[in-house]
Image (spheres, rainbow, N blue to C red):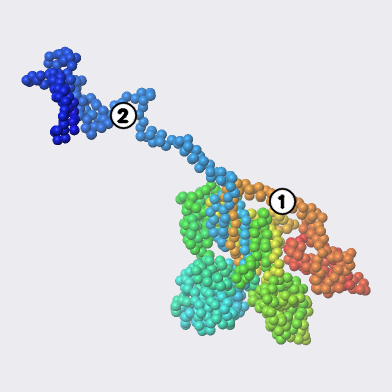
Amino acid sequence: MSSNTPNLNLLKVNPVTDGNDTFNIDTMLNDNWDKIDTTVGNKVDKVSGKQLSTNDYTTAEKTKLSGVATGANNYTHPTGDGNQHVPATGTSNNGKVLKAGTTAGSLSWGNVNGSEVVEDATHRFATDTEKVTWNAKETTTGSQAKADAAVLPINNRLNTESLTSIILVAGQQILNATKNARLQGLKVQGRTLMPLLSDSFKTDSNSDGMADGWAATLYGATPSLVSINGGKAQRITSTAADTGTPRRLERNITVESGKRYVALVDVVTDGTSLAHLAAASGTSTITNATSVTSAATKTHSVKFMPTTSGTIILRLYNYNGLGTVGWVQFDSLRVIEVSASDYISFDSMTSDQIAQRWPFVPPGINGVDGLYVRRYGRNLLPDKPDTLNANAKMNGPYDITLTITTGGGPSTTDVPVKGGAQYYLRATLGASAGQSYINYYWVNSSGVATYLSEISNATPQGKIINTPSDCVALRFNMAGSIAGTFTFKDWQLELGNAATPFQPREDSLIAFGGVELHANPTDGSEPDILREVNGRYEVTRLWREMVLDGTLPWEYNSTASGYKALRISKLGAVFSGNYIVGFATKYNGQTLVNTSDPIATAGADKFRQRAEDAYFYLSVSSADSGWGDSYTPSVDEIKAYFNGWKMALSGSTNPYNGTGTKVWGYQSNLYEGNTNTVPTTAVPNWTPYQLLYRLAAVTTEAVQEDGSLSLLEGDNFIEVGSGYVSRERVTPSTDTGNWYINNDPSLYSPGGDSRLKNKAREILNVFKESRVGAWIIEKAATAGYGNSRANQPPAIYDPSASYSVSYIKLDKSPVPGVTGFYASSEKAQLRDLTDGVTEALARVSVVEAKKAEKDVPAQITPTLLNGWETYGSGNAPYYYKDTLGFVHIGGMVKSGVNGSPILTLPPGYRPSATAGIESISVSNNGSGVLIGNVEVDYKGRVTPYSGGTTWLSLDNIPPFLAVN
């Protein structure tokens, strides 16, 4: 097949395929030659030594080249200044600039620094410091976020009612509060302790050095009772001549199989002697406590669960080795039945926890009595010392001048503190010569004081005090080093390690005097509950305690061999099965048996009330009452027994069986208080029978609190305790000099008898009428009934005024934990303030209403006793108290017996314990008018002692001031 060449387009044939074909000469040959000839005619002949490029060479280009000057390509670059070549760059010079060198014509690559640039008003460099400052400047967005974050807590505090819950345990503690606020929502659960044994070692009737009820194996050691804290303690002192070890005292207690018990005793020694507590069954020791050598009081304890009912022996040991001289001391022994859970947790409790859980309480039934919560002031020191030295003078609160002719002259103050805490002491001290100083000691639970340090006018007048763990108080002595005049001002002790501005001590307290809270004694179940509801306090009460004394309407029921069954009207109680849910104790604290058996066959020291019974029954042994089996006691004789009296055949201690002369004496000692007339008053210091029973229906009753507790921002030193008594009426006594409150005549007879109803651990306030009076309160009174007494000089004593005292009893009762909360945000505090004002206004209106009622006092109709009846509907007996506190009694009665009370006035309507009211009475015996007498005693009993009983008028009883 034919084809064409690529450049001249000449026709070609393929000899293989086209060899036998015919072709046209013009097409095949002539045309091809013509194309070749034309192409050859257009070429340029080659000249030797010359050649052309592949590009076309035009006339214009030739003309241009002709214009180039001769030698134009012979160029040499100048070498003078300003004509240098650019230096090589290289990777090492990236980002650099050309810089002139220090010599003419030199160039180099380099960096530009700040000093090489000229700044002007619009072109400035920034320093690192300026950059840091600018970078720290907040952006609008960031600024808003920070502002929102800063405001959020404030908004929350103002818009949210935030409350902080708190839990306070029994005893002393330190609580940190985030705000100054009031304690709100206080809630307390009741608790009841009934010790199987409660021995304070207070009596040694035969003066053998051993408390009554104890036996001894001493090998020559010496027993003795020593005075402590208003009571007694049992001491055993080993001698070098002792013939054996260990020396011990022991006594028996009766226990029941399967029940769980703990035995506790407070122990202190001389610091080296060994004290020991053990419980034994016969010759076998069943439990031991670790021996104690502490010079500070420790609670020693053991637990045991008898496998058989019977007798357990408690033993107190001086465990010193033979020939070792030293003493050990025991106090406040108690044995208490506990629940299964408490028995298990006992092993994991510390000594302090055990002591708080089972404190020493008197024999009988003990509920939470008179709960109080006290927050001590930020300044823990009072405005005057507990004991002011005779050479010291109070110029005013926190201001003393001491003038002495030789060194010393201490004025002493003790303040309770928490062990293991930090305090700061400061004062302003001055001296005319030498040094005025305050030295301080730490005091352990046994009252042993150990010196720590001092501050003085010559040393820093402020120091940090770190209290040891065994510390319960700090003691401060203000004194001078030599003869001279010394001043002490603005003393202050506070929690923490630095001083705050001086302020006087201001305690805050909330208390519930006269309120007793109980629970099931065996396991603590079903407790009474005290709580705050809408700003007022109320008790949800499930239990009722009764004092089974001679004021109750006792009746004779029946006689069995060795005992009598007595009764009172049926109690509204809960029943378990067929018997009352209740607990009872005798005058000596012995637990009575709750029996479902018929009381006539159950035996002595039992009580019973079945659901279908019309009475509550109690059985009394002839050994206790003095009533022989063939004698039936009268109602008044039964009442005398429950007031602490025992009957006997005159001239003997034998029970009275109906023949011969009757005589009565004290239950504790038949030879004391002897009388041939049926006693109508209680034996002094008598502890009556007690009953605690579960109420048939839960009741709610309002209670009145004393005070309101506030918390301070920061650390607060707080005490939760019991035994608070509110405003008990008292009649001061005098030694013709000072006037005294709570003077014990057995300790200071010239001071007279002004004892309170209970031994006082601490008098808090003395009130003249309704206001705090100017009385000096002695904290460590040697002549007080208990540990405290108050005195007042005759110049300011007002004999026409009435006085009352708020105090804390020396006798202990269970102390529970307390829960509550405080307002921790401003909104919550404002709410609390508003509620407080509302509550205050409501109370004011109630007070005004009550005053209006008192201005027109209502007459109260009493319950008549002992067969006395109302004489006629128009002459019904009545009593009332007027606005000045005077009690008025009137009306007419009949059909009673002289010597038996007509009625009993309630507390608050009774005359003074030292001044009963005697009055002339007008009566009739059916044949004529008689003149007799009626007495109103301090227990409120209105009793006629002579006159007729056909009718008897009470109108001649004069009004008297109610102080009891």
Amino acid type, callout 2? Gly
x%, y% of residue 200? 59, 72
Query: The C terminus is located in which quarter?
Result: bottom right
**Residue tagged 2:** 114
Question: In the figure, is residue 250 to the left or right of 602?
Answer: left
Q: Nearer the viewer, residue 820 or 751?
A: 820
Density class for disc 1 (Cα within 10 Å; few <14, some 14-19, many ≥20) is few
Q: Nearer the viewer, mark 2 or mark 1?
A: 2
Secondary structure beneath disc 1? Answer: helix
User: Residue 553 shows which numbered tag?
Assistant: none
Rendered view: 661 above or below 919:
below
Q: Earlier in the sequence, mark 2 or mark 1?
A: 2
> Image quarter for residue 154?
top right
| Callout 2–callout 1 Cβ contact below 8 Å | no
Percent position (x, y) of residue 487? 54, 50
Q: Residue at x 91, y 70 (%)?
A: 929
Inter-mark Cα distance, 2 to 1: 81 Å
- The type of residue carrying mark 1 is Ala
Q: Is residue 138 visible?
A: yes
Residue 231 % position (x, y): 59, 69
Q: Is residue 308 above or below residue 491?
A: below
Classify the position of the N terminus by image quarter. top left
- Residue density around tag 2, few if under 14, some if 14–19, many if 20 or more, within 10 Å: few
Q: Residue at x 77, y 52 (%)?
A: 849
Name the mark on residue 842.
1
Q: Nearer the viewer, residue 71 or 66?
A: 66
Residue 147, percent from left and from top = 50, 39
SS at badge 2:
helix
880 relative to 209 in the view: left or right: right
